[in-house]
Image: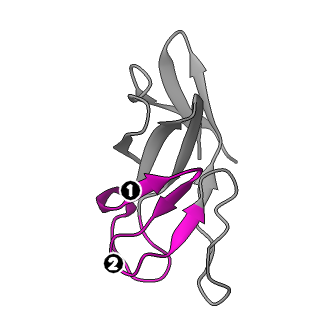
């Protein structure tokens, strides 16, 4: 059963990705255009941290092959690359929680 986990005491700075870990899962939280997002910090194509990449518009771009993933849905830019696992995220009293 999914449950909410506190991962940060405050929201990340706009346009940055902050690594967090819940239940041995490596994730990242980002604030992009005023919206919070959370996703797995691993490219589904090659096992590399997406936090080594960059944000482009509403997508996170992998530093290895340049594939990108929608921050809201996890949709991949390539049909033959799996989608990125994303998670619900919320802010309460400045603290950041994700649902895992």
For residue 20, above or below residue 85: above
Q: Which mark is residue 72?
A: none
For residue 8, above or below residue 66: above
Determine the secondary structure under disc 2.
loop
Could you tell me residue 58's position as x and y percent?
Answer: 59, 50
Q: Counting residues from the N terminus, which is met first, the one under dot 1 or under dot 2?
A: 1
Q: Which mark is residue 54?
A: 1
Could you tell me residue 77's position as x and y percent?
Answer: 62, 75
How is this picture coloured? Answer: one colour
| Residue 23 seen in the figure | no
Q: Quadrant of residue 7?
A: top left
Could you tell me residue 15's position as x and y percent?
Answer: 42, 38
**Residue visible at 43% across and 31% down?**
14
In front here: 21 or 61? Answer: 61
Q: Which mark is residue 64?
A: 2
Say whether residue 26 is left or right of residue 3: left
Q: Are marks 1 and 2 in contact (CB under 8 Å)?
A: no
In front here: 18 or 60? Answer: 60
């Amino acid at each position: 059963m999914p449950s909410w986990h506190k991962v940060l005491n405050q929201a990340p700075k706009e346009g940055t990705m902050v690594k967090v870990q819940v239940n041995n899962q490596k994730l990242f939280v980002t604030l992009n255009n005023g919206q919070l997002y959370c996703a797995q910090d691993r490219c589904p194509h090659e096992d590399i941290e997406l936090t080594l990449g960059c944000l482009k518009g509403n997508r996170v771009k992998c530093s290895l092959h340049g594939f990108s993933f929608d921050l809201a849905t996890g949709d991949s830019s390539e049909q033959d690359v799996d989608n990125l696992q994303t998670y619900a995220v919320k802010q309460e009293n400045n603290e950041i929680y994700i649902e895992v």
